Image: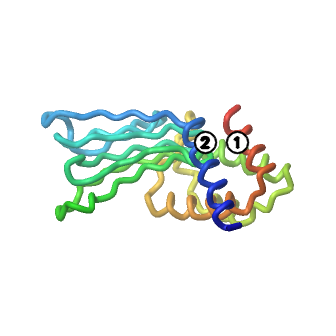
Amino acid sequence: MKKLIYFSVVLVVLIAGIIFSCKKSSTILSDSDKSIPTAIAGAKATCACAGGQTSCNADCLFSDCCVCYDPKVSDGACACYWGLAICKSSKKATEARTAVLNKTIHFQPQRFADYLQYLESLRLNTTGLKGQYNKFDKTKSDISHDQLEITQTEFDDLYNSYNSFILTLDQINLARIKNYIDHQ
């Protein structure tokens, strides 16, 4: 029963985080549009999808992402998870074809560094999260816009570390973090 209550609270907090900290858009492009993902240096992550595909993007505090997918064979979703953009596509259970997936992920290392300082000011253990953050090659950043295009693997590693961190927090610290993210 205790696990069910805990799971319910985490689910409600996750949904609230998605609703309050992210903008989502979706566009269907024609066959004449470019079929490669594009990312403009310093801009929010955008995708130029193949004809018949659609895309969604998430514009969050610490990262932006977009993903292209064919709605006939796959589902796509973009959202914010405690300030971290998540864009995913998965094949529909009824489809045997492989879905085409194009994805762009931008990360804002300075915003995340400021966030880590805030978390440390709350006396929270950020060792794992900071270790993951320090793995990024921040020399690739667009200095004028402080953005770094990262790979799916880099994002997955950061997300897993961040999710583990979030799951250790009590309701008071979750509320503090939500307030920080909402007011940046």
Describe the element under mark 2 as helix, strand or loop: helix
Q: Which residue is mark 2?
A: 16
The residue sitting at 13% across, 37% down in the picture is 31
User: Which of the two residues, 18 or 3, is positioned nearer the viewer here?
Assistant: 3
The residue sitting at 40% across, 36% down in the picture is 40
> Residue 11: image x %, image y %?
59, 53
> Residue 118: image x %, image y %?
79, 46
> Residue 159: image x %, image y %?
56, 59
Examine the rendered structure and indicate whether residue 18 appears above or below residue 98: above
Examine the rendered structure and indicate whether residue 129 appears above or below residue 114: below
> Residue 153: image x %, image y %?
46, 63
Describe the element under mark 1 as helix, strand or loop: helix
For residue 178, which numbered disc appears in the image? 1
Amino acid on which disc 1 is placed: Lys
Quadrant of the image for the N terminus? bottom right
Looking at the rendered structure, the number of numbered marks drawn on it comes to 2
